[in-house]
Amino acid sequence: AGGESRAVNLLQNRNICPPEPVEPPKANLRDDLKKVNTSPDLFRCTLTTLPQNQNLLNKCKLPLGILLHPFKDLSHLPVITSSVIVRCRSCRTYINPFVTFIDSRRWKCNLCYRVNDLPEEFMYNPLTKSYGEPHKRPEVQNATIEFIAPSEYMLRPPQPAVYLFVLDVSHNAVESGYLHSFCRVLLDELERLPGDARTSIGLLTFDKVLHFYNLAEGLSQPQMLIVSDTEDVFLPSPDNLLVNLQESKELIQDLLHQLPEMFADNTETHSALGPALQVAHKLMTPTGGRVCVFQSCLPSLGPGALKPREDPNQRAGNDVQHLGPATDFYKRMALECAGQQIAVDMFFLPGQYTDIATLSGVAKYSGGCTFYFPGFHPARAPAQVTRFERDLRRYLTRKIGFEAVMRIRCTRGERRIRVHTMALPVSSNITEIYTGADQQAVICLLSRMAVDRSIMSSIRDAREAVINACIDCLAQYRSSVSGQQLGALMAPWSLRLFPMYTLALLKHPAFRLGTSTRLDDRVNTMNQLKALPLAYNIMALHPHMYAVHNLNDEGALTIRDQIIPQPPILSLSSERLSRDGAFLLDNGEGMYMFVGRAISPQFCTDVLGVESFAAIPDVMFELPELENADSERVRSFVGWLREQRPFFPPLQIIREDSRQRMVFLQHLVEDRSESMFSYYEFLQHIQKEACK
Ligand SMILES: [Zn+2]
């Protein structure tokens, strides 16, 4: 049986957060099916036992939905090259581990129950190289699988990889210093861009005019071509703006070496992003591919120009305006791009309000992604620079799919299809539905619904809806399962963290009110909640905190001869902090180390490399590499946490008396804040409402 059916009295169980990461529930299936089911890293359902009908679903007051991370990098992925891809003749479902074989020639579809014939080819098992036993084929042994597709899955031959880099070089952009970082990283990674001998590349820079670069093979140096009519853009040359990477490699390298200096003294403050996107679209239309845009200010010229909409005095207000786009220019641009198989990725490096709510539309509707590095500056924000360079490196070298449709993608010139299949049991018993609930999937889905609601209606409405979801669910559980115990707030074991996560969501920068929050920061966190895989979504809402001043080898892991301490996860309350301690908080995107006033001088010298607490600098972003056991323990722990994710989380060290301390303390969601309940008060509020 999957899951525990016991109930928890929340008001009496104050230490509800477990010391280890929360495990996703396993669907209550037969062992043989459980073994083959899709990994929860790829596919999660809010209810791992499905209600038999809509009435029962309505009754349990939990949202039903699926969260997926379909193209996650996998360590084990069976890839099948097959001339036949077996699919149900009625519903087009791919043959999978949950079908039934009537006999050795026929299978019954598990989605529409139609009986299908097996093609002769399926009798041969390419892995075991033997005939017969179709149930041993890899397609029916693996819930996640990738096919190399035959030609009927393509509308045209697979396209080569095409990259166009579009760079803001207006005064603010150049001042931020990002061009140096960008050019250095691209030069380093040029050889590692995914693609083949056909890979093409182009560069476009812009301020109030557009600069193209002729990179034709045989030129002695790149030629800059300027288009200054931003109202009616055109391509200054029919070819050589997108060139073959191998053939023009030296010219491209030349250009990347020159770019930072070329614009070093640029005083032009205007930024014509809209026209730059229009020409990018023209340039990429014949092939499709990826457009990577680097933008550091509000576009001010030509189509798509924007006005500052944020009122800085309203950052702590009781509701928030301008969460939606100011114009549909960027959305329309994105849809046109998507129609030509062009994805637009946005790298924002803003020094001030840049209207992310409007500009991120161009990535959102073209299948692109968004990166955000506020206040990017090598001297003032070195952590952003590190993060930018690491993220850009990964972005440039990770696998990508071109011309992808839903589950269809193509890599390295092959057409591929990745299929995930998940099986879940069905029940008519409400206790079983609650027992199978996946609290992390539930809160993740609710947070995405809350983003939509904030934009369509208001943050206030969204907050209220989330609180009501929690109250309604616990009230229903109380009346239909746990019995009406006086003064108790009961939750099923599976949902014991639901109220905690709900409170964390209300305090998250996306939805908090009454605390100063810059509009672009807020919109960026909303975009992230919509786009991040579930595990990072949960970390963003409810970070992991550890004491790191007394790490030891008890329970430590040993990986490649390195000992990695495993301190317990602490609940997010200042009661867990101590003046003589150091605490590491990991919210997925970044890490913060909070150092108490009475920290031992030994920790200061051995781990931080300074004489005393008072000597810890105001701005400190890395741990020095010192040769002693304590330093090695802390660094190996931080390094191990970083290895768990594909992007790089910077570390910031914060003294207890620093002005930066709120950056850390705002994550302690169990504490009372100026405008918001403590966890205990929140439980009391829920109890009052749920037991009415
Ligand atoms: Zn079917």
Image (cartoon, rainbow, N blue to C red):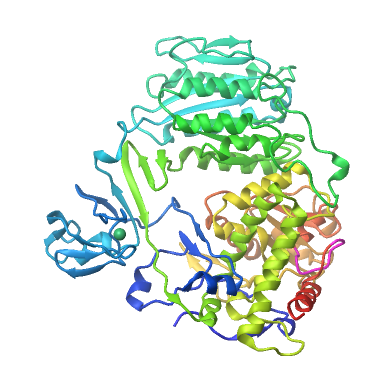
Give x and y (percent) for residue 153: 29, 41
Query: In the picture, which quadrant includes the C terminus?
Result: bottom right
Residue at left offset 71%, top offset 72% = 471
Judged from this view, the residue extending furthest toward the front is: 55
Total marks drawn? Answer: 0
Find ligand 1 in the image and state its quadrant: bottom left
Horizontal relation, residue 118 to residue 362: left or right? left
Q: Measured along the vertical axis of the image, is residue 550 above or below residue 444?
A: below
- Of residues 263 and 558, which is closer to you in this image? 263
- Of residues 236 and 447, which is closer to you in this image? 447
Give x and y (percent) for residue 559: 47, 64
As for residue 584 lying within the magenta part, the answer is no
Query: In the picture, which quadrant includes the N terminus?
Result: bottom left
Residue at left offset 19%, top offset 47% = 83
Q: Measured along the vertical axis of the image, is residue 49 above or below residue 281?
A: below
For the record, the magenta segment spans: 668-675
Give x and y (percent) for residue 644: 53, 58
Magenta span main SS: loop
- Of residues 132 and 372, which is closer to you in this image? 132
Q: Is residue 610 visible?
A: no
Q: Quadrant of residue 329?
A: top right
Horizontal relation, residue 679 to residue 498: left or right? right
Give x and y (percent) for residue 377: 72, 35
As for residue 673 lying within the magenta part, the answer is yes
Horizontal relation, residue 6 to residue 680: left or right? left
Residue at left offset 44%, top offset 14% = 240
Residue at left offset 64%, top offset 14% = 231
Q: Quadrant of residue 524?
A: top right
